[in-house]
Image: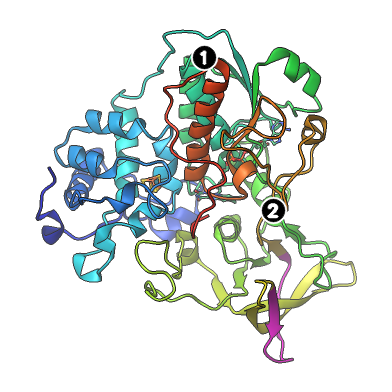
Amino acid sequence: MADPQGFMKHNRQDFKKRPVADRLSDWREVYLDLEPKVRDQQVRTQATRCMDCGIPFCHSGTAGCPLGNLIPEWNDLVRRGDWESASDRLHATNNFPEFTGRLCPAPCEAACVLAISTDAGGAVAIKRVEETIADVSWENGYVQPSQATVTSGKRVAVVGSGPAGLAAAQQLTRAGHEVVVYERDDRLGGLLRYGIPEFKMEKKVLDRRLSQLRKEGTKFVTGCEVGVDITVEQLRAQFDAVVLAVGALRGRDDVATPGRELTGVHLAMDHLVPANRACEGDGASSISAEGKHVIIIGGGDTGADCYGTATRQGALSVTQLDQYPQPPSVRDDERSPWPVWPWILRTYPAHEEAGERKFAVAVKRFVGDDEGHVRQIELQKVRVEKDASGRRSVVPLSDDVEVLPADMVLLAIGFEGVEHMRLLDDLGISLTQRGTISCGSDWQTTAPGVFVCGDAHRGASLVVWAIAEGRSVANSVDKFLTGSSNLPSPVIPNLLPLAVV
Ligand SMILES: Cc1cc2nc3c(=O)[nH]c(=O)nc-3n(C[C@H](O)[C@H](O)[C@H](O)COP(=O)(O)OP(=O)(O)OC[C@H]3O[C@@H](n4cnc5c(N)ncnc54)[C@H](O)[C@@H]3O)c2cc1C
Ligand code: SF4
């Protein structure tokens, strides 16, 4: 039973960030490494605020946690200081809580009953409780390899080692199947490795979890593009089922804006991947913002990651552009009523470090120098309109242009779906209009015995959804191989999000 007065005694408290100067001098996580005793006490106090609501909107449904994390249960266990039981309950629904605790935008917090009114002090800082349970679990050895007690004699290939592939692999290995994860990159982790910067989640957090998966028996093959380095025929001959967790990594380009062809205009991932590689010790980044005026086009998460990366690389200036107007700082109940994901201004730690954001603007053209290198952008004030069929158009408000210096332009305007790859052609799988891989109610694609999960199924989304889909696909594959399954299945396929992607 929760403390019924906890939220009246304590306000929401998030973790403190390191001073900006320290953050910019390295790539380490933004939040302060608190002394464990201080951290644990702060989080216990925060967990005390949970009201254990009759209907806990935070923990499931269209608005809360896609994994069905048992939030009120582990809040109460943390409040009492029973970290080991909290760890059990957390890991019962989430394979990688240290990833979501650091990276999740926390739809659970938006759906917390304490978030309805600011008078209640704000939502419980759920993701910090989650992160701390996970960290305490590792520190105290509560996280151990969990070996299968029976073996099925069945073999499963998982293609892609992002959070969806890793969650599916861990579940299926624990169910007794022999699982091999194939990854075309030289290192494992998908976007956790080469997309998301260290300052959001240090790679040692990922490596620690990968070592657990290895000890449990999951096998990994890196540097192997399935469909090319191992053919579909070989895959079919060697495995009883295949899980496609290949992500949705086809970056959206901006071919329409004059000057796109100039040197110095890049897709966001062309910047983030080498920056992450540099942190792995692979040598200086091939596309660095050092000494440059940087323009980031696109107001979302990927843009914010480019922002923090460019600042750390020593950019002269960083400006992030968004076509949409600046959202309000508090929830607009008409547009996004509680408990749905609110349309509000999201300020990431990177935005507090340097630079500026501009809203309701669009680039008219990129202007180059005699060598064909971008040097300026021309910016117009715009309004985004939608016609009756939902088609979007960006309308300039006048002919006036603002000129900004620009030595490097990063296009962070989203992803168009799964990359075109030989694997899909040879499996006879075609992409949907959204560029994703479709499946039936059992996550099976049009190719028999081939399943899909994560961004490849959903389109570019979130780590929490990737893990939830990885867990669910494992349940279906287990059933396909053995006739039944005890594995949990937190989400159903083809369930598109209402607001949080
Ligand atoms: C810059 C950036 C920042 C983000 N930040 C956040 C965040 O803070 N919080 C959050 O919740 N979400 C964030 N996301 C989204 C999140 O990273 C993704 O939703 C999640 O990683 C999807 O997981 P996945 O396993 O489906 O695919 P991915 O992580 O994309 O992994 C797919 C893997 O498949 C491999 N692959 C593809 N084809 C083949 C093949 N034929 N053979 C072998 N391997 C193959 C790829 O190399 C890749 O490693 C971010 C995304 C980006 C781009
Ligand atoms: S995974 Fe995300 S939504 Fe679920 S409890 Fe953690 S922070 Fe909240």
Q: Tell which of 481 and 377 is nearer to you.
A: 481
In which image quadrant can residue 312 be found?
A: bottom right
Whether 229 is drawn above or below 96: the answer is above
Residue at 60% x, 57% y is 306
Image quadrant in which you'd find residue 448: top right
Query: Residue drawn at (80%, 72%), measured in percent from left and top?
Result: 257
Residue 389: image x %, image y %?
Answer: 67, 72
Residue 217's disc is 1
Q: Residue 72, how many percent across, how many down?
A: 24, 44
Residue type (three-letter) at the residue carrying disc 1: Gly
Q: Which residues are magenta?
A: 392-408
Report how far apart the C-alphas of labels 2 and 1 lie in the structure: 36 Å
Decide if residue 382 is on the left or right side of residue 170.
right
Indicate yes or no whether the magenta region holds residue 401. Answer: yes
Q: Is residue 20 left or right of residue 309?
A: left
Kind of residue sitting beneath label 2 = Arg
First along the sequence among labels 2 and 1: 1
| Mark number, residue 434 | 2
Residue 278 appears in the picture as rendered: no
Pinpoint residue 38: horizontal percent, then vertical percent: 21, 44
Circles 2 and 1, Cβ within 8 Å, touching? The answer is no
Q: Nearer the viewer, residue 108 or 193?
A: 108
